Image (cartoon, rainbow, N blue to C red):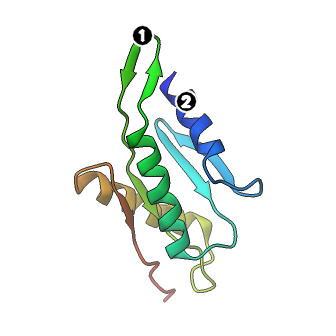
Amino acid sequence: MILKEFVRRLSSHGRRDYDLACRWGGEEFLVLLNGVTLSDAVAFAERFRLYVSENPFEVGNQTLTVTVSIGVAEITLCAPYPERTIKVADDALYQAKLGGRNRVQYIEMPTMP
């Protein structure tokens, strides 16, 4: 039930029709925001993080506070490979988790050798 509500919130919270959101595995999701800067993506992630943490989930007769850790990376002309960008975003996600959870973390993409 929590995952379904999370998806509903992700689908309705500022994501545009041409952006892509999908379940990446377990409790991880991947969101591709087309045509935005890294700072715009970080701002989107922060707004969504606050939206989730400040609005408890109703599951049956329970009210649950849910938090989200988010890793952000940017595909650029210097780093056009999606799998590399996903790896960088995943690394940022784990930094967010290690940094105390309920955070947004980004890593600047390393330039291609």
**Horizontal side of residue 102 vs 106, given as left or right:** left
Whole-percent x, y for residue 12 in the image: 65, 43
Q: Going by the picture, which residue comes out furthest to the right?
A: 18
- Up/down of 65 relative to 87, above or below: above
- Up/down of 53 relative to 98, above or below: above
**Residue that label 1 marks:** 61
**Residue that label 2 marks:** 5
Q: Secondary structure at mark 1?
A: loop
Q: Secondary structure at mark 2?
A: helix
For the residue carrying disc 2, how many other residues have a C-alpha within 10 Å: few (<14), some (14-19), or many (20+)?
few
Query: What's under tag 1, amino acid-wise?
Result: Asn
Write the residue at 37% across / 50% down: 69
Whole-percent x, y for residue 96 in the image: 31, 57
Whole-percent x, y for residue 21 in the image: 64, 49
Write the residue at 48% across / 56% down: 47
For the residue carrying disc 1, how many other residues have a C-alpha within 10 Å: few (<14), some (14-19), or many (20+)?
few
Numbered label tally: 2
Q: Nearer the viewer, residue 17 or 30?
A: 17
Write the residue at 43% across / 78% down: 108
Q: Nearer the viewer, residue 15 or 30?
A: 15
Write the residue at 45% across / 67% down: 88
Q: Nearer the viewer, residue 89 or 33?
A: 33
**Of circles 1 and 2, which is in front?**
1
Marks 1 & 2, CB-CB < 8 Å contact: no
Query: What's under tag 2, amino acid-wise?
Result: Glu
Q: Earlier in the sequence, mark 1 or mark 2?
A: 2
- Up/down of 53 relative to 90, above or below: above
**Horizontal side of residue 83 vs 104, given as left or right:** right
- Up/down of 59 relative to 72, above or below: above
- Cα distance in 3D space between marks 1 and 2: 15 Å
Q: Going by the picture, which residue comes out furthest to the front?
A: 54
